[in-house]
Image: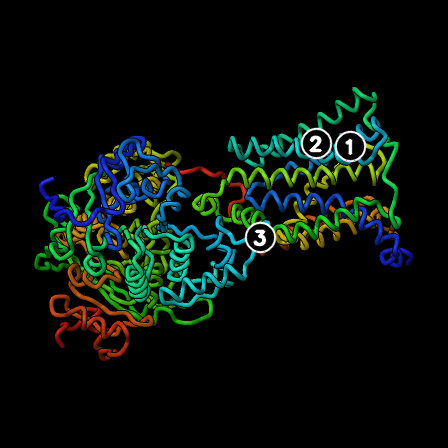
Amino acid sequence: MAENTRSEKAPDPLIRMEGITKRFPGVLASDSVDFSVQEGEIHALVGENGAGKTTLMKILYGIYSKDTGQIYFEDEPVDIEDPKAANEFGIGMVHQHFMLVPPLSVVDNITLGSEIAHRGILDREEGKKRIQELASDIGFDIDPEARIEELSVGVRQRIEILKVLFREAEVLILDEPTAVLTPQEVESLYEILNNLQEQGKTIIFITHKLNEVMDLADRVTVMRDGKEVGTKEIENTSKKELANMMVGREVLLRVEKKEAELGEELIRTENLTVTNDEGKEIVNDISFSIQEGEVFGIAGVQGNGQTELIEALTGIDEFSSGTVEVQESDLTNADGREIREEGIGHIPEDRLDRGMITDFTVTENFVLGYHTFERYSNRLFLKLREMDAHAEEAVEEFDIKTPSIKTLAESLSGGNQQKLIVARELSQQPKLLVAAQPTRGIDVGAIEFVHERLMEERARGKGLLLVSSELDEIISLSDRIAVIYEGEFTGIFDADETSKEELGVYMTGSKRQDEEKVRRKALNQVSLRE
Amino acid sequence: MDWILEIFAVSTLLATIRMALPISLAALGGLFSESTGVINIALEGIILMGAFAGTIVTNATGSPLLGLLMAIAAGLGMALIHAIASVTFKANHIISGVALNLFATGATFFLALVITGGSQISVENSLPKFLGLSPVIYVTVAIFFLSGFFLYRTRLGLRLRATGEHMAAVDSVGISVTKMRYIGVLISGALAGLGGGYLAIEQANFFTKGMSAGRGYIGLASMIFGKWTPWGAAGAASLFGFSQALQFRISIPFVPDEFLQMLPYLITIAVLVGAVGRATPPAEDGNHFIKEG
């Protein structure tokens, strides 16, 4: 533990976990981990997916039992057998997947299990009063009678926090609290957490986003492969250092991009329009072309037509007008199979909904969509041996962490599920790859890997249509960037000559380039500088 | 045109109430079970068991009250088996229910043969009527009022309903999912058992094989049509009761009686086709709880 520069013995920690080991079938999830928290601090617990952060916290909260090790609370050895015991020590947890009952009201959800009742009959009025007090203490308003299913994700999270506070928790564990939030919601979560800290609460939050650690935490503990790698004071560390500790080697926070070597035109789309059920144009008269060896990025705030454009292009949805030509063949409104046969791969935006069937095995997911291709099937039967052999190779090549190719996709971590999808699409050697949010929700190491692979494809002369809400990603991977706003391109930029700030202005529609110029630039008819 | 008048007659109303009673108890039973996420298709067999057990005990003791209590006990026994199979041993809820229904059909027929040598047993006593109706009917109305209060206003009711919607959330606040589910299933068994006891002792005054005749299933249909609420279930059960009442009371010119007898079942299908799409069952219906770690 050379990297372990634990601060000079500060005051005695509130909670100390020593030598915590937890083994799941086939995995050592926590390998004699030491972890301690000071009273009143905000402590970040970071690491890649599968590093053991959540396991460690679930042990502290009594959901998992530890195999060996000891937990000390205020220097006393304690046993935390179940969440109820954790509550008695004032420990509460906000789970990543909310533990809220959607059809029930806020007050019923918050009080569930600790109801205010007289002889078994609920006193909801008293509950509502207490909840409103708690909410205003940390700076927000809440309608205790609203049903959970009517509320946004951000509000639901606040209710989870209230649920913990209602049980008089002094230590709050938050498991990836920002993973599901919009940037504005993240801001108000920060405020809430700061307010809680001012009230003297202790906060442990799990994350893999290093920006959050730097913004919010007092101290940070890094985990990797079930081990604790080190604990740092925020003043004495940097994103770069933390990233290296997480991954265990030097991480490139920027992508290496070679000079583009453009070839012939791969795809040409003109006047694409998608209308929704109410007849409103979600994608409005968009044209673009992509050449071999080129990455065409589409930047925009979520919900400006990106999803609809991609889904119509890949055969999930339909264009109401416009044409799609891929090297002379007309692929307008072709179905998913025709599109794949033409050599267009698709990394979908929502990997669970569109990208895989989680109840299927790694192998089955690996051939999904290509199972009708000659290499995997003859007319009647699947070629199971070939499928397995190819899946095995891909698992190796793409470093997909799975016990076997027969494992169900649902038991893979998010990053490995995404690698599996990327592996499937790239193994077919598509000439054009449509990649939507290819690194959403995956950790630093996997992001770096996916970026490298996409850049390799570009170097091989493949075309890439990239949609991402991460501006850093768009700028570092793309050659040309189109900004989409309310279903229209508002500007086309050279990735080397634009900035996040410039794209941001166009993303909100407050500025736009001349319509005809945008069209000609998108179709590669004029240079981007004009 | 007499049959039109018959529809609105007081006697038809009373018949509707009598017919609706076992269905409504089954519906309420289904509601309690499904409010904890356990599908209880065994209601059909529980009614049959209740009817049989109630008949035997009434005849043996001469007390219809003891008979009804025995019907409830039989319902509890059947429900306990269902809970052990589907909650503790995580069997498929439907399979366990179907098995119990087959068991009830076979066991009651066999025991009836052994005890009396026939498949029909007449019941010798029933409770004295109050205002022309069986006291069980008044008790059932009270049960409905209490159930509404219990489910929506008490601590245990809230916990039961939360279990049917999100088991992990219930577990995460230290409530035993298994216990909640046992409570829900057992209440459903007691209610459907009472419905069966009423059917044989108070309504038909005899037991015969297969006498539940789909009332458990129609009860489930009522529960769905009533959108998993006690009063919705009662209303839907009344509709089915009405259609059953009519089949015996009217004959429409040129319409064969057999068609009228099909009416309750046709209405069941029509109602489910129309209603299922819109009503949302408890989210955990049919799921098993598997605890982490």
**Res. A342 mark:** none
Q: Quadrant of the N terminus of chain A?
A: top left
Name the residue located 83 percent from the left edge and 20 percent from the top edge. B117
Rendered position, A513 above or below B20: below
Which secondary structure lies at badge 2?
helix
Front residue (pair B197, B278): B197
Label 3: few (<14), some or many (≥20) within 10 Å? few
**Res. A118 mark:** 3
Identify the chain of the residue marked 1, using the numbered disc in the image: B
Q: Which residue is mark 1?
A: B54
Label 2: few (<14), some or many (≥20) within 10 Å? many
Residue A420 visible in the shown view: no
Which colour scheme appears in the figure?
rainbow
**Res. B74 mark:** 2
Name the residue located 58 percent from the left edge and 41 percent from the top edge. B39
Q: Position of residue B120 (x, y in %)?
A: 83, 28
Identify the chain of the residue marked 3, using the numbered disc in the image: A
Mark 3 vs mark 1: in front = 3
Rendered position, B89 above or below A154: above
Residue B207 visible in the shown view: yes
Which secondary structure lies at badge 3?
strand
Front residue (pair A109, A76): A76
- Badge 1 and badge 2 both on one subunit: yes
- Which amino acid type is marked by label 1? Gly
Identify the chain of the residue marked 2, using the numbered disc in the image: B
Q: Does the CB distance between marks 1 and 2 fall below 8 Å?
A: yes
